[in-house]
Amino acid sequence: MSTIRCPVPEVCSARAQGAAGSGAGGFTLVELVVVVAVIGLWALTLAPVLARTRPDVRAVQCLNNLKQWSFGQCMAASENADILPTDGMGANKLYPGSPTPTGTPDDLYAWFNVVPACLREKGLMYY
């Protein structure tokens, strides 16, 4: 069995002493402080970028909500002879509607009670 010789004896002996020395091998306080400082600087540079993306996220959420409501309107219309649900009109589709109450949260024919049912949500009358 042949032994492998180190090409640079000074480096090999220093590594051997460090590995077998008195508790060497951990991080020094200076190294830890430098790492914490670098992470802090990285967080400071990243914070404004994340703050600029928040309005974009809210705009996307708003567009998604509008899209869902429009899908609900279309589904409600397709189930009711292509007539959109209205507010303040009862089953007779006249204003003021009949039967009462019309335009209130208890109006079963108002859009805010008809459309959520198409989206598998609760209507306003249940809140």
Image: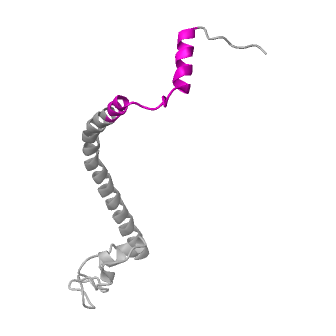
Instruction: Estimate the x, y position of residue 9 in percent, counting from the top left.
Output: 57, 9
Q: Which secondary structure is most common in the magenta stretch?
A: helix
Instruction: Estimate the x, y position of residue 107 in percent, counting from the top left.
Output: 29, 84
Instruction: Estimate the x, y position of residue 108 in percent, counting from the top left.
Output: 33, 84
| Quarter of the figure with residue 34 | top left
Q: Quadrant of the N terminus?
A: top right
Outermost left residue: 96
| Quarter of the figure with residue 29 | top left
Q: Nearer the viewer, residue 16 or 37?
A: 16
Query: Magenta region: which residues?
Result: 8-36
- Residue in the picture at 38% in, 72% down: 77
Q: Quadrant of the C terminus?
A: bottom left
Relative to 8, 125 lies left or right: left
Instruction: Estimate the x, y position of residue 109 in percent, counting from the top left.
Output: 32, 82
- Residue in the picture at 28% in, 91% down: 99
In the depicted structure, whether residue 85 falls above or below residue 4: below
